[in-house]
Image (tube, rainbow, N blue to C red):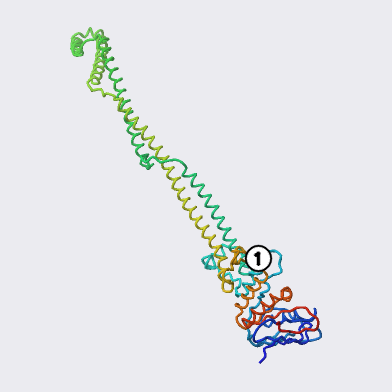
């Protein structure tokens, strides 16, 4: 049975038949402008599943597209029946890979890469990147929401790579800042290996030395005071012995006794003797006071005088000074060690941030590598996507942009990619302006490649006469 596509009441087309040669090749829709060539190509795209708008012919209420196992009825609502019996790549056009018709090189390559994604049936699915970020939750924290809304996988990968690089720069800046702070903390101070490092113990030793010093000073002062007291007692005793002219207390007591006897015997002399007794009593009290004072001085003089050792005080003063210095040195050393410890902690944190920055830069590269891996299913060996540009390895010129290849070279590669992706016996629509821009040699090359894959390319060119489909020879 002959394989054909029948179109009726679509655009200006009343009825048209497009043959699908079993041996493959190129079928060209010819006719004057306005005859429906573009509508016929759109009808083929709709047959393949593309969402293409198809207007009905004026004055009709129903149009049809029938062929390759599928029938589409276009009316108030479009009804599709059957399953397509030929291979195809929905939404892909090899001519856009050859020449997207965009002057800006980067924008042109973006369209070429989009076409490669169509051929590879690669969609902009954020889940493809989950493993790179660890999981979906981590990715949502890391990237901007708009990055996950990109329409094509390459655009999404580029946006995610920018997000990763931005975060890596932030981590790197934080790392440099921490390294700077760490250097300032650690500084050039060096710690004496013999310097005390236990501030508490140094303070305890300082307190002990202070108590010993205070005790020594107190003992020294007490000894000096006792010495002064001793010397004063000696002087006072000498003075008292020299100044005292009274008699002995025993002798005076005898006189008192005699006087009392005399008083008892001589009542008449009472008044005189009472006066004398009062005087003698006063003298006796004075004698007692004198003897008491003398005994006190002799007691002091009988007690050994402590010798104040000023050398011991000096030694303890030196020990106290050393303890004070040790405390200050311990505090200074502890401060240096604390700053060094915090500095090393900052260095470790800085190193971790630097490693994380490297990790996220590599993650960004993995995002673009993922696109390359996805496209490798259709891209020929040597064709890669780098920084949003499509590159190819030329046998003589090395790595060059795909756009720098000749038209014939780009055309052969594009057709090879499209035909390999669609499979043998596929159906590929091609833009009219692209076909018309090819010279006879390149047209013959396209037809030959299509025949090799037993696939059919449907394109168009302007010519005289009504709409018709002819096999290119």
Left or right relative to 98: residue 14: right
Q: Position of residue 256 (x, y in %)?
A: 20, 12
- All told, the count of numbered labels is 1
Q: Position of residue 175 (x, y in %)?
A: 52, 52
Residue of label 1: 404
When asked about the image quadrant of residue 442, the answer is bottom right
**In the figure, is residue 220 to the left or right of 148?**
left
Q: Is residue 57 above or below residue 291?
A: below
Percent x, y for residue 158?
60, 64
Q: Residue at x 29, y 21 (%)?
A: 227
- Seen from the viewer's position, the closer of residues 35 and 57 is 35
**Left-right relation of 99 to 304:** right
Taking depth in this image into account, of 260 and 348 the one nearest to the observer is 348
Q: Residue 420's quadrant in the figure?
A: bottom right
Query: Which residue is located at x 69 percent, y 70 percent?
Result: 100
Judged from the image, the secondary structure of the residue bearing numbered disc 1 is: helix
- Residue found at the far bottom of this picture: 1
Q: Provide residue 245's location: percent of width, then percent of height.
A: 25, 8
Crowd around label 1: few <14 · some 14–19 · many ≥20 (10 Å):
few
Q: Quadrant of the N terminus?
A: bottom right
């Amino acid at each position: 049975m002959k394989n054909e596509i029948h179109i009726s009441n679509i655009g200006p087309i009343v009825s048209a038949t497009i043959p699908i040669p079993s041996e493959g090749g190129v079928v060209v829709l010819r006719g004057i402008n306005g005859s429906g060539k573009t509508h016929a190509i759109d009808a083929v795209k709709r047959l393949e599943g593309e969402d293409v708008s198809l207007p009905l012919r004026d004055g009709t209420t129903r149009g049809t597209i029938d062929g390759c196992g599928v029938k589409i009825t276009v009316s108030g609502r479009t009804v599709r029946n059957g399953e397509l019996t030929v291979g195809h790549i929905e939404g892909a056009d090899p001519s856009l890979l050859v020449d997207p018709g965009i002057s800006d090189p980067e924008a042109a390559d973006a369209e070429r890469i989009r076409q490669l994604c169509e051929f590879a049936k690669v969609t902009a699915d954020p889940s493809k990147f989950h493993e790179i970020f660890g999981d979906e939750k981590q990715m949502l924290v890391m990237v901007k929401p708009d990055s996950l809304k990109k329409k094509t996988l390459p655009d999404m990968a580029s946006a995610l790579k920018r997000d990763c690089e931005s975060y890596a720069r932030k981590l790197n800046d934080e790392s440099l800042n921490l390294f700077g702070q760490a250097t300032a903390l650690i500084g050039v101070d060096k710690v004496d290996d013999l310097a005390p490092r236990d501030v508490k113990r140094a303070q305890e030793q300082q307190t002990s030395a202070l108590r010993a010093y205070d005790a020594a000073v107190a003992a020294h002062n007490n000894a000096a005071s006792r010495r002064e007291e001793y010397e004063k007692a000696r002087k006072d005793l000498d003075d008292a012995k020299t100044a005292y002219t009274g008699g002995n207390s025993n002798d005076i007591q005898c006189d008192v006794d005699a006087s009392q006897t005399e008083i008892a015997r001589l009542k008449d002399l009472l008044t005189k003797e009472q006066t004398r007794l009062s005087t003698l009593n006063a003298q006796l009290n004075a004698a007692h006071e004198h003897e008491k004072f003398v005994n006190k001085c002799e007691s002091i003089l009988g007690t050994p005088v402590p010798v104040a050792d000023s050398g011991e005080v000096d030694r303890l003063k030196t020990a106290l000074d050393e303890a004070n210095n040790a405390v200050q040195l311990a505090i200074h050393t502890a401060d240096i060690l604390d700053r060094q410890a915090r500095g090393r902690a900052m260095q470790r944190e800085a190193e971790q941030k630097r490693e994380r920055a490297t990790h996220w830069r590599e993650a960004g590269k993995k995002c673009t590598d993922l696109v390359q891996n996805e496209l490798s299913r259709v891209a020929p060996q040597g064709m890669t996507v780098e920084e949003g540009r499509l590159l190819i390895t030329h046998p003589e010129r090395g790595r060059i942009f795909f756009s720098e290849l000749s038209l014939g070279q780009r055309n052969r590669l594009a057709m090879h990619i499209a035909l390999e992706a669609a499979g043998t016996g596929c159906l590929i629509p091609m833009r009219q302006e692209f076909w018309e821009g090819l010279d006879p040699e390149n047209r013959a090359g396209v037809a030959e490649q299509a025949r090799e894959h037993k696939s059919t390319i449907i394109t168009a060119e302007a010519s005289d006469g009504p709409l018709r489909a002819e096999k290119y020879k």
